[in-house]
Image (cartoon, grey):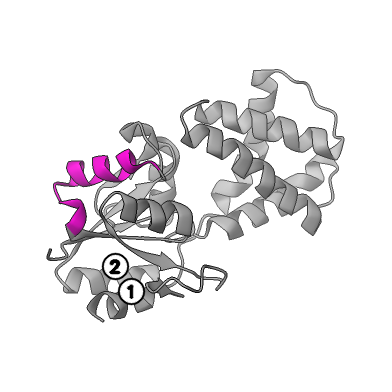
Amino acid sequence: MELRGVLLDLDGTLVDHEAAVTEALLAWLPSLGVPPTEEVLALWSTVQERHMVAWRERRISFQEQRRRRLRDFLTDLGVPFEDEPDRLDRLFGGYLHWYERSWRAYDDVTETLEMIRRAGLRTAVLTNGTVEQQTDKLTRVGLLGRVGPVYTAEELGAAKPAVAAYVSACDRWGLAPGSVVNVGDRHDLDVVAARAAGLRAVHLDRDGTGPRGERFRIGSLRELLDVLVG
């Protein structure tokens, strides 16, 4: 089937989520009296993934995963806190303030979008996030309106790696799954899951830690069209 569209992941693909998290933690943790060591930053990532899984599986709300993440994180560090939803939300807001200030698009995004456009292909975004946060993120980094339609797990009612997330996104986009290639940094969520839904897939392995057996693997978005044409 002829390739017609490129479906892009957002965090880790278009926007440097990990750098934003690190910058935010470096600024926010000292206000809690917590030194931002490598071990503490790693703990944040571990706790985040634990509760994001529950949210992706639709077992808890997005706000609740934030509260559970913060509760576990502070408990593990031995930091005292008031375990009430409103107070947890305000405390998490301190982290969000810095996280949002740290959003930046990767330097290979703009030229890649232009290359895709010149190749006659459409682009869209599929992200495991909320409409409000991900739209705001794209706006702040200057990409909203340049990446095509944005499909979020929140509005689709399904999150990657669920096949339904990919099928629903393609259906709304008006393209057959087989005519779409998905590009993302998570091999499990963006490659294996996309192929299970009938899409083609390319793994964006920016740090070179992905599966070596993956044939369609790139280290930068600048390599995307070479892989698709080749």
Mark 2, residue position: 113
The part of the chain drawn in magenta is: 162-178
Image mark for residue 139: none
How many tags in the picture?
A: 2
Amino acid at pointer 2: Leu
Residue 146 can be seen in this image: no
Instruction: Please report the residue visible at 33 percent of the width from the left and 51 percent of the height from the top.
Output: 196
For the residue carrying disc 2, how many other residues have a C-alpha within 10 Å: few (<14), some (14-19), or many (20+)? many
Q: Quadrant of the N terminus?
A: bottom left
Instruction: Please identify the dominant SS of the magenta region.
Output: helix
- Asked whether 172 falls inside the magenta stretch, the response is yes
Q: Quadrant of residue 117?
A: bottom left
* Residue receiving disc 1: 224
Q: Left of 39 or right of it: where is 132?
A: left
In the picture provided, is 61 more to the left or to the right than 111?
right
| 157 relative position to 46: left or right | left
Q: Looking at the picture, which amino acid does disc 1 mark?
A: Leu
Q: Residue at x 31, y 39 (%)?
A: 164
**Label 1 to label 2: alpha-carbon separation:** 10 Å
Of the two numbered discs 1 and 2 in the rendering, the one whose residue sits closer to the viewer? 1
**Residue under the point 55% across and 28% down:** 63
Q: Is residue 60 magenta?
A: no
- Coordinates of residue 193 in the picture (x, y in percent): 38, 51
Q: Nearer the viewer, residue 113 or 49?
A: 49
